[in-house]
Image: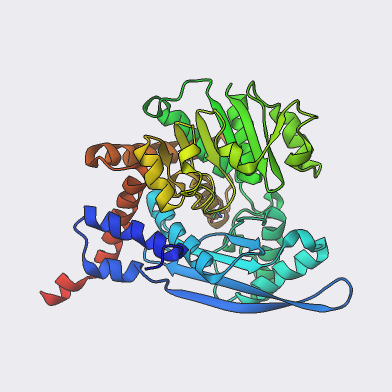
Amino acid sequence: MSDDNLFDRALVRLEEAANHLKIDQDVIEKLKYPRETTKTRLLIRMDDGSRKSFLAWRCRYDDTRGPTKGGIRFHPDSNIEEVETLAFWMTFKCAVMNLPYGGGKGAVRVDPRALSRSELERLSRAYVQAFATTIGPDRDIPAPDVYTNAMIMGWMADEYNQITGSVSPAVITGKPIALGGSLGRNDATARGGFYLVRHLAEELGLEENHTVAIQGFGNAGQYYAALAAADNNKVVAVSDSTGAIHKPDGLDVDKLIAAKTAGRCIADLADALGARAISPDQLLAVEADLLVPAALEDMITRANAGSIRAKVVLELANGPVTPEADTILNDRGVIVLPDILANAGGVTVSYFEWVQNRQGYYWDLEEIHSRLKKTMEREGRAIWTIGRERNVSARSAAYIHALGRLATAIEAHGTQPFFAG
Ligand code: GLU
């Protein structure tokens, strides 16, 4: 098994969790492979009249617990292995949260920042044309992921409706509010992580006004900064793909978000915010109680895990800590709140959106927040308890928790002992 294969590394979690539970081999055999992955090419007319072709995928990893669910990512480095790994993680994430979904994921290999708005729209619509029979409100439900947003989900929902000749908002979540999106979906990933940290603060050893460093300043990172600052915590360092800044007595988060929204890069903001420009790796090593990786996978590795000074790592990104780094952090007593729990607020409010679309009745923001809080606290507490009882990390506990649910569902269809009997 190659060490640098993202998917093989993800499977190690499954095997580890299986060792803790009495699980039928049939269950592992089912969860070891994606059910289906479709690859296609999207041929787009560019603004200059030329045509350009982009690779695209959609993976439906496992649908035992319900229709497959997971975002679509637009990224220049996207590849099939990443899509299948992210779909595997979605399978476990939905099981962790007890949402009636399996796991899926999609991607287009593209740098969306190099496209005009109308090129982006044609690409988004072409994705739905290509996967119109894969997705569906009872089959596979996409959502936003890295470099995709509500506007893109709106184009995609509209394209699906045109193809099917009916209006089915539940085919996709993370839509604009005006097209059946849910209140509270925009900050749901960060808010879920925030509720989790607040609920477990005592166990995590985090004081009420702790310090936070955030890697990645997209949707999840920005909202986390805003929520943490509003709760009297100090955001002392942030980074984006251009660079990082550090200010030990706390950054002005409102100014930071306003500048970022206006299209500025973090690397250019040091002076305006009275902060020091640092390197992205230095961000991981700043003095902060809580480190929030909110960018991409494989950011915390064997090479830099030893320099992390935080007590707690909250994985708002998917897969930001490699297994080797995980072991280093564990050995050093750093608590890692794992992605399949920490960032599950996003898919949880996606689920609320889907429920509202199907019932045609919409909840107010208070209702969304209180349901999200309850779900994060319930599953966070359950995982914390498993970790303590079995003396395992929060990550192992989360996988044990999810695998228990997946196994029960798979076993309900009948496994070998049943047929042998
Ligand atoms: N892309 C997000 C994730 O990785 C959200 C998925 C969803 O809402 O379906 O969890």
Location of the C terminus (image quadrant): bottom left
Q: Is residue 171 above or below residue 176?
A: below
> How many marks do you count on the picture?
0
Instruction: State the image coordinates of residue 209 (x, y, percent, origin top left).
Output: 53, 20
Q: Is residue 85 above or below residue 275?
A: below
Instruction: State the image coordinates of residue 129 (x, y, percent, origin top left).
Output: 66, 76
- Please name the residue shown 72% across and 63% down the image: 111
Q: Would you identify the image quadrant in which residue 134 lies?
A: bottom right
- Please name the residue shown 50% across and 46% down the image: 343
Q: Is residue 40 above or below residue 285?
A: below
Colour scheme employed for the rendering of this structure: rainbow
Which residue sits furthest right?
A: 48
Which residue sits furthest left?
A: 421
Q: Nearer the viewer, residue 343 or 211?
A: 211
Q: Would you identify the image quadrant in which residue 29 lies?
A: bottom left
Location of the N terminus (image quadrant): bottom left
Dividing the image into four quarters, tell me where ligand 1 lies.
bottom right
Q: Is residue 204 above or below residue 359?
A: above
- Please name the residue shown 65% across and 53% down the image: 180
Instruction: State the image coordinates of residue 374 (x, y, percent, origin top left).
Output: 43, 37
The reply to whether residue 99 is in sight is no
Instruction: State the image coordinates of residue 74 (x, y, percent, origin top left).
Output: 66, 62
